[in-house]
Amino acid sequence: MGFHEEYKMKAFREQLLASLHLLAALCTILTAMIIYNAFDTHRGGATATYAFLFTVALWLIVLYVFISGKREIDKIINSVFGNNSSIISYYAAGSGRYVGIDTNSGNILLIALDKSGQQVFGFNFQDLAGYEQKDCVLTLKFDDINTPSFKINGNAKIIPFIDKLDFLLSPSYSPSKGSNKQFSQIVAERMQTA
């Protein structure tokens, strides 16, 4: 899958979630007005009930999308990293993007959820060429022709992750242990067995 196709799928997920979230918020306001009117005029109880149920259904869909995405990400993380406490990570629920870095080995796990499923990438620390940050958007750069970058649209909570990333990219940091296999191969093997 090409870089532009991946970007379109990511954008689709973000737009879908944003649209659902906005629709649910607007329906909440509209439902509050309908319920107020039903109590005030003592009419329209059925309309208020249907509006309330529709609004609850929308919020449940939004919640389901966020929870199912987080569960899928956690399943992959446990499959690849196991119960490792030396991981620094960031998960952007809205875009379905995850980045995790094992500070001991320097292995980097990237996960992208989109409408066609999931994409999982593994990199060694030496493959990380740097990053760019614009507001709350983090773009990791890699020395890899197939995945030259990985963009995460986050929120303000991404800033502490970027601070840790600055330390990892400083000359004073080097992974304390290495791996005898390419981490990308390990990730591919574990994803096949999962």
Image (spheres, helix red, strand yellow):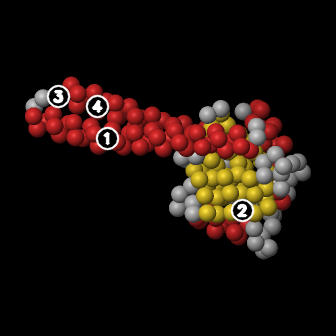
Query: Would you call the spot at circle 1 few (<14 residues within 10 Å), some (14-19), or many (20 or more)?
Result: some
Name which residue type carries label 4. Answer: Ala
User: What quarter of the picture does the C terminus occupy?
Assistant: top right
Name which residue type carries label 2. Answer: Tyr
Name which residue type carries label 3. Answer: Gly
Residue occupying image coordinates x 55% and y 44%: 14
Residue under circle 4?
51
Q: Is residue 54 visible?
A: yes
**Distance (Cα) linking label 4 and label 3:** 11 Å
Q: Toward which corner of the image does residue 163 lie, by quadrant? A: bottom right
The numbered mark at residue 163 is: none
Residue under circle 3?
44
Q: Toward which corner of the image does residue 90 lie, by quadrant? A: bottom right
Residue under circle 2?
131
The numbered mark at residue 28 is: 1
Residue sitting farthest toward the right: 180
The local secondary structure at tag 4 comes to: helix
Residue occupying image coordinates x 65% and y 32%: 116
22 w.r.t. 115: above or below: below
